[in-house]
Image (cartoon, grey):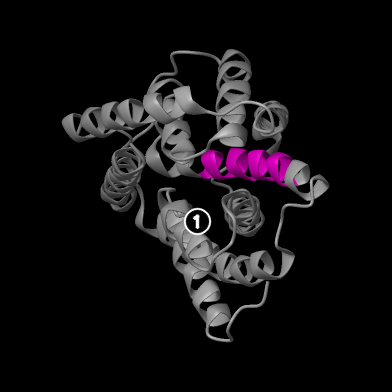
Amino acid sequence: MTFPLWAYPLLFLTGFVAGVIDSVAGGGGILTLPVLLNLGIPPAQAIATNKLQASFGSFTSAWSFVRSGVVSFRACLPGAILTFIGSLLGAAALQWVRPDLLERLVPWLLAGILVYTVLRPRLGEQQTRARLSASAFFPIFGLGLGFYDGIFGPGVGSLWTLALIVVLGRDFVAATGVTKVMNAASNLAALSVFLALGKVHITLGLVMGAGQIVGARVGSRLVMTRGARFVRPIFITMVAAVLARLLWLSLTEG
C-alpha cells in the first residue's frame, strides 16, 4: 500500500499525543488505532502496527520512570517476565480464538473502575498498606493482564494502575511507573508474535513510534513533576474515553 505524504506527519503527531496520554494515564490506543484504520489498513495489520508504535512509547516511558528512581527495575522484573509470558500466550491465542467474551466484559470492568475512582477522591494520593505481597500479586495480575493485553488490550493500563493502587498500595505516580514497565513487557511479547506472522507495517509503525518517543518523555516528566493530583483527573478522563469508545463500537457493530 502507498500513502499520501500528509499521512506521515499526521502519524507522527498522533504518536506524540498518544505517547503523552499513555505515559500519564494510558488509553492512547483510542487515538492511534482509528487513525491507522482510517488510512485503509486492514484491522489485523492495524492492530499489529499499533503494537509496534506503542512499544516505543512504553519503553521510553518505562525507562524514564526507572532512571528517575520512581520505579525499581529489579523489583519489577519478575512481574515483567510473567506479563511477557501472559501476553505471548494471549497474542498466540488470538490467531484461533475471537475475544468476544472480553469485548462484552471489559466495558463493565472499566465502568466499575470509573465509579470506584470517582467515589474515592483520595485514592492513590499516597502509599497505603498492600493487600497482597508482590510475590503473590505478579503471578496473578502479570499472567492475567498480560494475556488480556495480548488477546484484546483496551483499558489494560487502567486495569494495571488500579490493581497496583488497590492491591499493592502504590500511589498514582508509582502505579503509573510500574504500569509502564508491564506495558513494555506485554507490548514486546505481542509484537514478537505479530512480527513473526508478518502482520506489522514497519514504516508506519516507526513513524508513529518516533512520535511516541517524544510524547512519552513529555508525559513521564509531567507525571513525575506534578504528582498524583495531576494524574488522577487524566486517569478518570481516559478511563471514561476508552469506555465510551468500546460502548460505541459495540452499538455500531451490533
In which quadrant of the rendered view does residue 93 lie? top right
For image coordinates 73% across by 46% down, the residue present is 194
Residue found at the far bottom of this picture: 5
Q: Quadrant of residue 142?
A: top right
The relative height of residue 97 versus residue 247 in the rendered view (above or below) is above
Is 184 magenta? The answer is yes
| Residue reaching furthest to the right | 196
Q: Where is residue 143 in the image (x, y as percent from the top left)?
A: 63, 22
- Where does label 1 land, which residue? 33
Q: Position of residue 77 (x, y in %)?
A: 71, 33
The image shows residue 7, relative to residue 194, as above or below, that is below
- Circle 1 sits in a helix, a strand or a loop, which is it? helix
Q: Give the range drawn in magenta.
A: 177-191
Give me the residue at 29% from left, 40% from top. 251
Q: Along the horizontal axis of the image, is 177 left or right of 139? A: left
**Dot 1 surroundings within 10 Å: few (below 14), some, or many (20 or more)?**
some
Q: Is residue 107 magenta?
A: no
6 relative to 191 in the view: left or right: left
**In the depicted structure, whether residue 220 falls above or below residue 247:** below
Left or right of 226, for residue 70: right
Q: Residue at x 39, y 36 (%)?
A: 171
- On the image, which quarter does residue 186 sit in? top right
- x, y percent for residue 94: 64, 32
Q: Name the residue located 64 percent from the left edge and 54 percent from the top edge.
A: 45
Q: Position of residue 165 (x, y in %)?
A: 40, 29
Give the position of the C terminus as an image quadrant: top left
The image shows residue 212, relative to residue 165, as above or below, that is below
Is residue 175 something that shows in the picture? no
